[in-house]
Amino acid sequence: MTNPLNELNPTGRFSDRVDNYVKYRPSYPAALIPFLESGLGLKKGQQVADIGSGTGIFTELLLLKGYTVTGVEPNKAMRQAAEQRLGAYDRFYSQDGRAEATGLLDQSINLITVAQAFHWMDMEATRKEFKRILKPVGHIALVWNLRLLHTAFLQSYEEMNREFGQHYDAANRIKEDELAAFFHPAKMRIQTWSNVMLLDFEGLRGRTLSSSYMPAEGDPRYEEMINRLEELFATHKENGLVKMEYETKMYYNE
């Protein structure tokens, strides 16, 4: 099945968002990497490929725990940001490649991770490529930070994203039945964690502008969006901060 998001330039659309992505995108819960060890059997010395690694947010969590990680990223600006961020780690390797054509060796990888990127990938071509590079007993972990909607602030922020976001639903497309088909015949499992960011206005602005579907500076709707964001922040801030809450969700094979 060809991913309809291919028409939205998935490999290039973040090029003008890199600075905000580096500064303001959320990381992932501290318990996630230990779960890869206890739940998926990840061990030191094994090879990890972080596909669609972007600016290296998830990659760095693995490197901090002592793993050897190859970050595969097709977007030049994001890949260079990761190389600058992670260049001091001697177990980090940077690869110019796509999920559908990673350039990695056959059956060379113990664990494939994809954080906040799988929905941009062509599922069938990616499945074939992952099968090629993964060792016979290897694992795949697909991870997203999914914004919650249970507070007045989060609901208002969601409404603002829907109003100003271009192709908003397409860019947030996650269907669990399709993910289960991707893992088949292996059984898909799901693990969840809570994840929270406390943001001042600059942080909220940067987090918003890191999303590729939101108007960038120079867009005709940019000023209107920023005004709406200022109103939203003023209404919902507590002690100068708003709480951006996520459910971090990981889909993986047994």
Image (cartoon, grey):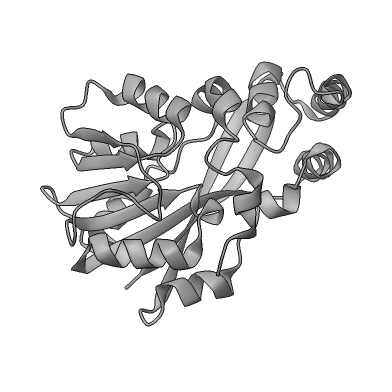
Is the residue 84 above or below the residue 73 in the image? above
Q: Is 31 placed left or right of 157 in the picture? A: left
Q: Is 31 placed left or right of 235 in the picture? A: left
Q: Observer-nearest residue: 84 or 206? A: 84
Image quarter hosting the N terminus: bottom right
Where is residue 127? Give x, y as percent: 39, 66
Q: Is 157 placed left or right of 17 in the picture? A: right
Total tally of numbered discs in the picture: 0
The residue sitting at 18% across, 62% down in the picture is 107
Instruction: State the image quarter where residue 236 is shown.
Output: top right
Q: Observer-nearest residue: 92 or 13? A: 13
Where is residue 193? Give x, y as percent: 48, 53
Where is residue 201? Give x, y as percent: 71, 19
The residue sitting at 32% across, 49% down in the picture is 102
- Can I make out residue 203 in this image? yes
Is the residue 219 above or below the residue 5 in the image? above
Q: Residue furthest bottom?
A: 185
Image quarter hosting the C terminus: bottom left
Instruction: State the image quarter where residue 59 is shown.
Output: top left
Is the residue 202 above or below the residue 120 in the image? above
The residue sitting at 13% across, 48% down in the picture is 44
Q: Observer-nearest residue: 10 or 52? A: 10
- Can I make out residue 150 in this image? no
Q: Residue furthest left?
A: 45
The residue sitting at 60% across, 43% down in the picture is 9
Is the residue 76 above or below the residue 142 in the image? above
Q: Is 66 placed left or right of 223 in the picture? A: left
